[in-house]
Image (tube, rainbow, N blue to C red):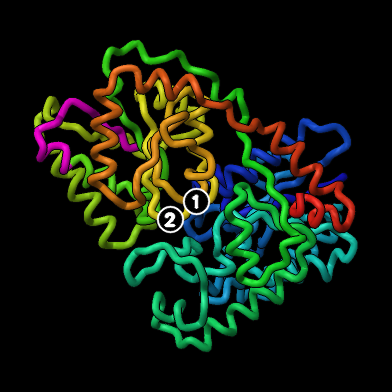
Amino acid sequence: MKVLIICMYHPELVRGGSQQVAYELFQGLRQVPDVEPVLLASITGMSPTLYKSGARITGFDGRPDEYVFLSQEYDYPWQKSGNVQLAEAFADFLALINPDVVHFHHFMTLGIDYLTLTRTVLPSAKIVFTAHEFLTICVADGHMRRFTDQSLCTSASAVRCNQCRPERPPEHYFMREMWMKRHLEAVDVFTTPSRFMVEPFVNWGLPREKFMQVANGLDPRRTPALAAPARTHRNRFGFFGQLVDAKGVQVILDAVTLLRAEGFTDFSVEINGGNIQFATPECRAGIEAFLAAEAALPPLERNVVLNGGYHPDQLQALMARIDWCLVPSLWWEIFCLVISEAWSFGRPVIASNVGGPAERITNGVDGLLFELGDARALAEIMRRAATEEGLWERLAAEITPPASRAAMAAGFLDVYRAPAGAASAAAAG
């Protein structure tokens, strides 16, 4: 079986959950006999030196079966490329690779219409689409979080989408929905890493019988178990992720401000992450102002440290420095790979109480949940976590090891090999 895995961005160039999962799957399938995986990852103008004159798809860094799609002229409102030569190159690439399965882990920077193009070029191939957010439904970056009042959104409509993005009329969003659904018709099986994701898609109009769930997995060699911290107080917290609005690092900074105002300073927070250039100007300004003020304090008075971006190989050392992993996301947070990473290292998670984290974490059993976006609630839980004797040990003892990369690969192989109608049976089950 030959499997072509397509993702937005190569994880070596731009860190992010969807591309990391796609790459983990690519590596996992390479270990399976009689399966030949091929990876096609997009790059954008953020990596200008990788663009070659006349090239549209090239090999990547001399690695076998890894290719990059040189995206350009991308139309974000319609989620399509305006470059005809890119579409021709993609069609030629499909014909050359001739896979049995084409697995899209994203379409952004390529085009939603490439689903239909794939079906045209490869009429017999199975097309699998894994949703890592709700970008097909939601024009607010796929987060289903309203720009109007920052509340979570449960349904999309022409008027509601126009309220979030008023620069285009409601008719645009009506046509966009038709455009998306037309190309999604080419998909044989949709997969989601979390169960709760299925309902928004079904309510939007996609057929329930086409959905299956496969949990995201990790390479256990990258996340070896850590011993419990040899510290009396469990008062060290860590954030791992992108410094963008929806990830909620600003909620942590507000919670720190509240704790200090109450006279509680016996704690530390390490911020690990990058991509702040993708945050809104307001969010970026607030984060940078806080961190600049923090850096100006004497070292012994600092509670927050910015470590910056990190490579997966550095994760073990960074996790060893903390007791608790903070996940203060302000959106539904589909699966949250960092929860798996924290659990792999034996670190309990404190997270927002919606979406993927709420589905995965049992509050008070293997982690702690707080009201989404409530900095005061987070501050109270951080104080409790840093002071309640035995809490860390009790929660850490109940952590269940997350799915491995091999388990994820096996799950997707079941999807690839399933006969028509198997997704319907799995959904009913």
Mark toward the start of the polypeptide (1 vs 2): 2
Query: Mark 1, residues whose alpha carbon is within 10 Å: few (<14), some, or many (≥20)?
Result: some
State whether residue 45 is above or below residue 315: below
Q: Residue at x 88, y 36 (%)?
A: 34
User: Percent position (x, y) of residue 64?
Assistant: 73, 39
Instruction: Determine the image quadrant of residue 308.
Output: top left
257 over 330 or under it: above or below? above
Q: Is residue 41 magenta?
A: no
Q: Secondary structure at mark 1?
A: helix
State which region is magenta. 257-271
- Does residue 43 appear left or right of residue 206 in this picture? left
Residue 91 in percent (x, y) is at 78, 66
Give residue 229's position: percent from left, percent from top.
Answer: 37, 15
Q: CA distance from mark 1 to mark 2?
A: 8 Å
Q: Are marks 1 and 2 in contact (CB under 8 Å)?
A: yes
In the rendered view, would you say 111 is above or below 369?
below
Q: Residue 150 bears which disc, if any?
A: none
Location of mark 2 (residue): 331
Count of marks placed on residues: 2
Residue 118 located left or right of residue 353: right
In-image side of 185 versus 376 (left or right): right
Q: Which residue does the image show at 36% across and 69% down from the upper left?
A: 147
Q: Residue at x 52, y 47 (%)?
A: 356
Q: Please say if 314 is above or below 96.
A: above
> Which is nearer the eye, 429 or 152?
429
Residue at 58 percent of width and 71 percent of height: 79
Q: Which residue is mark 1?
A: 355
Verify whether residue 268 appears in magenta: yes
Amino acid at dot 1: Gly
Q: Quadrant of the N terminus?
A: top right
